[in-house]
Image: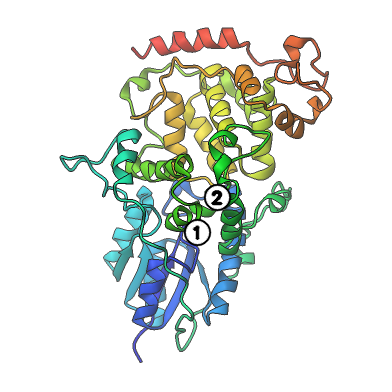
């Protein structure tokens, strides 16, 4: 009997349109393995909200695998050493996986390839990151020309169905259990409301896609309205690979151009971190190294107020409380809250990036770093720093009143005319905080700081 093949799973937790699984099954007996590796990513080990999602996604994947005659093996440790040990236990010499582009996963793939026959496949993006290049063969740095070029390669190939059965090995190696990993919070259980919003796993991803398919026509307008919540909410399913971008593209249809451009942005973010692996910790524009951010001691109270949704700006506070309660935040509000931290509070964008990394169920190294640097103006493709988003104006413009009432219950009784700025209207409830800083004062301080970078 030939030796089994290892299927190394990471952010690709699905059976359909999974090229690595298809190739492994073609080879013969397959041992699917997920390794909880907190060593290789170091400071970018998975955050708390993502660990909640991972627990439920792995449970769903194991159930799906068992229905195909297989099962999921769980191990904890460094990826390269753990795969080598499992290969020795089982006699496997070959490993199939989907290629990943975070710097730690690229390093892990190189380390695995030194010990075993590693075969990497594409499938987590519309096109392999790095493959969409300029006429001179250089990867794009700016999104707009990247998106135009990417569309020339679309649509992606039609997705493949899940295999009818997955060949099993003669003997299964030992597996740890999800309970061993303690991925779910308990004391306190700050994620107790997550389950009302999310159904992790491949089946949940396709249910969400089916729901959004009926809403996609209204996406261009609804995506900016927090009270409507017109986002697709597919981002955590895409991040964990429970659904492929090709499945999403073909599922919504080519008429959903604005939405598909957001899927293209996800590809663009991977192109950026492929060129700049340290993008989550270093400014894309070196001029921003001179930005006089407030020091940790001076800004500590403001940072905590922002994290807790106690800034005195209702739209900001609603977003930050939604994030803490559900592990997610409306896209428009993400931009408003990020801009507020950076420009109103003059706090280094990296502090926000780290908070989102821990709190978002869809925390993604590429998206998170590219989006924060776009907002800060420090990115290689970014908004200009002097374009300071006015949260009170944004709140009114995008009709966020009901959204604020949902997430900031202290303001539930405030009428439409005052809900966006109850302090200015003279009706701020006693239990709702005053503004940490006025908009005009914050704007002048931010522009003065920006001049130091010139």
68 lies above or below 355: below
Q: Nearer the viewer, residue 295 or 267?
A: 267
From where the camera sits, is residue 59 visible?
Answer: yes
Q: Kindly identify the residue that appears in the image at 60 percent across and 46 percent down.
A: 215
Foreground: 23 or 134? 134
Quarter of the figure that contains the C terminus: top left
Can you give x and y, in whole percent of width and height, for residue 220 in the image? Answer: 53, 36
Q: Secondary structure at mark 2?
A: loop
Image location (x, y in percent) of residue 251: 49, 56
Compared with 45, 92 (above or below) is: below
Name the mark on residue 355.
Answer: none
Mark 1 vs 2: CB contact within 8 A:
yes
Residue at 45 percent across and 25 percent down: it is: 376
Q: In the drawing, what numbered circle is on residue 243? A: 1
Q: CA distance from mark 1 to mark 2?
A: 9 Å
**Could you say which quadrant of the image residue 143 lies in?**
top left
Q: Residue at x 68, y 27 (%)?
A: 400
From the viewer's perspective, tell me whether residue 62 is left or right of residue 105: right
Residue lying furthest bottom in this view? 1
Q: Is residue 194 above or below residue 419?
A: below
Residue at the location (42% across, 13% down)?
450
Can residue 308 be seen in this snapshot? no
Tell which of 131 and 24 is nearer to you.
Answer: 131
Residue 399 at x, y percent in the picture: 67, 26
Q: Is residue 291 above or below residue 174?
A: above
Could you say which quadrant of the image residue 401 lies in? top right
Say whether disc 1 or disc 2 marks the residue closer to the N-terminus.
2
Q: What colour-coding does the image apply? A: rainbow
> Horizontal and vertical percent for residue 119?
30, 68
Please identify the residue farthest to the left as the structure is shown: 136
Quarter containing the N terminus: bottom left
Q: Which mark is residue 234?
A: 2
């Amino acid at each position: 009997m030939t030796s089994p093949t290892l299927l190394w799973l990471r952010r690709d937790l699905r059976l359909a349109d999974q090229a690595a699984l298809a190739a492994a099954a073609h080879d013969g007996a397959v041992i699917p393995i997920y390794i909880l590796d907190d060593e290789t990513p170091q400071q970018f080990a998975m955050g708390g909200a993502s660990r909640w999602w991972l627990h439920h996604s792995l449970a769903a994947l194991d159930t799906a695998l068992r229905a195909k005659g297989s099962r999921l093996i769980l191990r904890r440790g460094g990826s390269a050493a753990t795969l080598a040990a499992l290969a020795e236990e089982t006699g496997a010499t070959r490993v199939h996986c989907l290629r990943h582009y975070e710097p730690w996963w690229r390093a892990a793939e190189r380390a695995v390839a030194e010990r075993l026959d590693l075969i990497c496949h594409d499938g987590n993006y519309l096109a392999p990151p790095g493959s969409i290049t300029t006429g001179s063969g250089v990867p794009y740095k700016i999104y707009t020309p990247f998106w135009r070029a990417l569309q020339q390669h679309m649509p992606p190939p039609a997705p493949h169905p899940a295999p009818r059965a997955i060949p099993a090995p003669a003997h299964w190696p030992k597996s740890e259990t999800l309970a061993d990993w303690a991925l779910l919070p308990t004391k306190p259980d700050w994620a107790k409301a997550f389950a009302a919003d999310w159904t992790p796993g491949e089946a949940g991803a396709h249910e969400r896609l089916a729901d959004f398919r009926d809403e996609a026509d209204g996406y261009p307008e609804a995506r900016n309205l927090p009270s409507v919540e017109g986002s697709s909410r597919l981002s955590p399913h895409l991040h964990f690979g429970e659904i492929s971008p090709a499945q999403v593209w073909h599922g919504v249809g080519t008429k959903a151009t604005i939405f598909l451009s957001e899927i293209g942005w996800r590809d663009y973010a991977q192109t950026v971190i492929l060129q700049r692996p340290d993008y989550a910790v270093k400014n894309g524009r070196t001029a921003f190294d001179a930005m006089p951010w407030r020091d940790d001691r001076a800004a500590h109270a403001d940072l905590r107020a922002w994290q807790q949704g106690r800034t005195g700006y209702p739209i900001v506070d609603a977003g930050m409380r939604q994030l803490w309660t559900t592990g997610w935040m409306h896209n428009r509000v993400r931009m408003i809250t990020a801009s507020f931290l950076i420009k109103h509070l003059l706090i280094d964008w990296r502090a926000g990036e780290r908070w989102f990394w821990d709190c978002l169920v869809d925390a993604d190294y590429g998206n998170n770093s590219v989006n924060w640097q776009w907002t800060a103006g420090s990115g290689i493709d970014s908004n200009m720093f002097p374009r300071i988003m006015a949260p009170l104006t944004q709140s009114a413009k995008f009709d966020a009143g009901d959204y604020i009432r949902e997430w900031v219950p202290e303001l539930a009784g405030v009428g439409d005319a005052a809900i966006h700025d109850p302090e200015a209207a003279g009706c701020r409830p006693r239990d709702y905080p005053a503004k940490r800083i006025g908009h005009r004062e914050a704007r002048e301080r931010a522009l003065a700081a920006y001049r130091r970078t010139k």
